[in-house]
Image: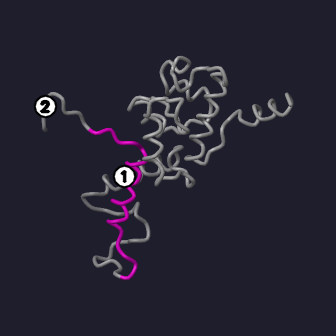
Amino acid sequence: MEVLKSGDAPAIVSNIEVMTLLRERIDSRQPSPDTGSENGENTNNSNTKEGPFQNRDWIEGAVLNYLQASPCGGPSVKLDDMPKLVERLQREPNSFSDETGYGLTSAETLQVLNHLPTSPVELHLLVEDLENRPGFAADSVHSAEEKQMQFLKFISGYSGREVEGADAEDEGEEMEE
């Protein structure tokens, strides 16, 4: 076991990165269809695989299935755009820019990436002291609730998931007009 030196911290990895890694590892171990099985092993069902690595294969498969069923494993998640999302989530709020940031910490950013929140309740659970954060606090133009809904809609653009309560808010705006 390696002892970490002071100041060295392990890298934080998101569920999306773990899922990508597991897919690559599992795909690299799959025999190609044209080679067939050399030792007579049943290649049609990976669950019947015997050998020293059957537990590893089962665990990796179970973790991959879990991650694919989680919010970050949806088919409409835009993996290529995640670096831009992370940069904007961590950028400090600035009223002089067209693309303002949200000033989230690394841990909060990781939680948002892993859960891809769709409701204000989820957002409050993931971001500490949300009401007093510069990117989410009320200003002269928008209320705090409006800013939170804008954030959730921004996240839904990357996740492809519908924002809960957005329809009711849109109907309320139409009724006021």
Q: Which residue is drawn at 31% across and 52% down?
A: 55
The mark found on residue 5 in the picture is 2
Indicate yes or no whether the magenta region holds residue 4: no
The percent coordinates of residue 41 (x first, y second) are 33, 72
Q: In this view, does 9 lie above or below 128?
A: below
| Residue that carries the numbered disc 1 in the rendered image | 60
Task: Find numbered disc 2 in the image and state the secondary structure of the residue it sits on.
Answer: loop
What amino acid is labelled 1 in the image?
Glu
Q: In this view, does 111 lie above or below 158?
A: above
**Which marked residue is nearer to the observer: mark 2 or mark 1?**
2
Q: In this view, does 96 lie above or below 162?
A: above
What amino acid is labelled 2 in the image?
Lys
Residue stretch in magenta:
11-34
Q: Main secondary structure of the magenta part?
A: helix
Q: Residue at x 35, y 42 (%)?
A: 13
Q: Which residue is drawn at 53% across and 17% down?
A: 132
Ranked by sequence position, the earlier of labels 2 and 1 is 2
The percent coordinates of residue 122 (x first, y second) are 57, 29
Residue that extends furthest to the front in the rendered view of this protein: 96
Which of the colour schemes (rainbow, by chain, secondary structure, one colour) is used? one colour
The percent coordinates of residue 146 (x first, y second) are 66, 27
The answer to which quarter of the image holds residue 106 is top left
The C terminus sits in image quarter: top right
Closer to the camera in the image, 82 or 137: 137
Task: Find numbered disc 1 in the image and state the secondary structure of the residue it sits on.
Answer: helix
Q: How crowded is mark 1: few (under 14 residues within 10 Å), some or many (20 or more)?
A: some
Closer to the camera in the image, 98 or 110: 98
Q: Which residue is drawn at 37% across and 64% down?
A: 27
The percent coordinates of residue 176 (x first, y second) are 85, 28
The N terminus sits in image quarter: top left
Q: Residues within 10 Å of mark 2 (few under 14, many from 20)?
A: few
